[in-house]
Amino acid sequence: MAFFDVIMWSDYGGDICGQVAGTAFVVCVGSYVLLRVWRSYCIDRKIKTKQESLKKSLQLLSEQLRTEGVSSVHRDKILELSLAELQQKLQSGELTAMEVLRAYQSKAMQMNEHLNCVVEPIWEAQALATECDLESKKKGPLHGIPISLKEAFYVQGYDCTAGMLHYVDKPVQDDAVLVKVLKRQGAIPFVRTNLPQTMLGIETSNPISGLTKNPCDQTRCAGGSSGGEGALIGGGGSLLGFGDDIGGSIRIPSAFCGICGFKPTSERLSTRGIFPLGSGQTLVRDAVGPMAKEVDSLVLSMQCLTVPYMYELDPFIPVMPFRTEVYEKKTPLRVGFYTWDGCIHPTPAVARAVMVAKSALEKMGHTVVEFKPPRAREAFIEIFLKTMFGDGLHEIRKDLKYDRIDPVIRLTYYGFSLPYFIRRIISFLIHFIEPMTADVLKLKTTTVGEWWNLAQKIDEYKLEFVKSWRNKKLDAVICPALACTPVPLHKTGDVINSVSYLGLFNLLNCPCGVLPVTRITKDDDKKLADPSVYSTEI
């Protein structure tokens, strides 16, 4: 009887334990689901609140321009002026800074309606224009010139988010060094432009400000990460703007939007006050540079920025004033060229563009010779990409933990979120279909020893490249900006590997730029389907 009671009690106790465990499981799962739903609601609400704030700011400026703007005829006359012409008229007093500002604000708002390239206006621009128009005001070389800025630049009192919720409602406390120098030289920063979430995409889109379109064809992307700048300048809404470039972020949108862009060496212009994404990674450094319709505008901006005030604000920048005598030198040059870097074949239009530039240089009296960059594929994948993704995107994934992941970076984000052994399996499965993508998936977070080894490889490759350059006795090289022309919206994932042409010069820390030389022809489109046009010889 006693034994029977013990058995009954054990069964009863077991039922209680099962019920408690089951209840605890249901509570845990329910709590987790509720937490995820609540977190999703908070994310959506924060995005919507920020979007409404930015929209209201843009609408307010548009309303002001209806009552305080210049006439459309006067505006168009201002917009037709080159930077040099505008500079002359502002210096002489023929135009006021306020007139010019209103003209470009109006055009920027008009372009933004079609392209979604502007994040928000900089309200202090009006006070700066008023100050410029004071008779007692000393005129700097950029007196009254409106300047657009990529959202990655710190502007006091404004958020600097790189398209990520983590940085919303955290206004920065000071201007970037470059912004301070621009203001000292008389320029008027007037709008902030769109960029991809995390600034790692070659298409400009983020959950806060949305997708930016190409000014030449709104069904195609504007490039990234300085895509808002490229679209605004390409559409005529800005005469001169600034972006930054660690893997083509100035050059891709410049090439896609038909404008000029310049990436200096990494310490030519100060990067203090630029969004600090991956700032601890110092093997391949970010560079700040100008974007404009004309090469002369890039030159003028570099002349105005490489001044004592910049070196005073950032003592770690080597003092190197702009050498006008070198720029204006007329001695014939020896220029190398290539249309294929050994990684991704360019489209016929891109290859033809290089040959157009080659022909133009030869007609100008320069010598143009074939050049093949050494080990370009290995340098791009095994050195450049391994450096860029050295932390396995840990910092980025941490910032995006409570965020909406934009489609532009979704594949990269979730790909690097997978355990390494799964990435290796995927890499093996797709190796014969997408060899470069397979190689990228195999990139692994490096140890300190591997990181030091990577630094040594970079130095060795730089020496190897310089040796090849000197063997050809070159002064410069021309090549594709990237392997493709502007791609349709949401299709940049198909051409991500084409940035091999760009990353090489970030790895080498060489100055380089982009300028338009031709347009796509029907014949280029016909050749796209013909494999024989993808020559491997040059």
Image (tube, helix red, strand yellow):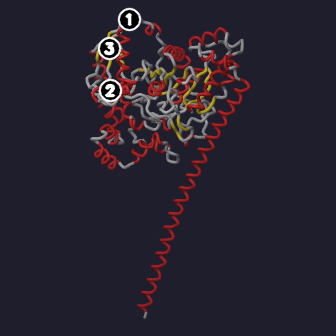
Contact (CB < 8 A) between labels 3 and 1? no
- Give the percent coordinates (x, y) of residue 529: 33, 31
The answer to which of marks 3 and 2 sits earlier in the sequence is 2
Few, some or many residues within 10 Å of mark 3 (<14, 14–19, 20+): some
Q: Which mark is residue 50?
A: none
Amino acid residing under circle 2:
Asp
- Give the percent coordinates (x, y) of residue 429: 29, 46
Few, some or many residues within 10 Å of mark 2 (<14, 14–19, 20+): few
Residue at 47% across, 36% down: 489
Picture quarter with the C terminus: top left
511 and 459: which is toward the camera: 511
Mark 3: which secondary structure?
loop
Residue at 39% across, 42% down: 392
Tell me the CA gap for discs 3 and 1. Answer: 13 Å
Which quadrant of the figure has residue 177? top right
Q: Is residue 460 visible?
A: no
Amino acid residing under circle 3:
Leu
Few, some or many residues within 10 Å of mark 1 (<14, 14–19, 20+): few
The answer to which of marks 3 and 1 sits earlier in the sequence is 1
Mark 1: which secondary structure?
loop
The answer to which of marks 2 and 1 sits earlier in the sequence is 1
Residue at image mark 1: 331
Residue at image mark 3: 474
Tell me the CA gap for discs 2 and 1. Answer: 31 Å
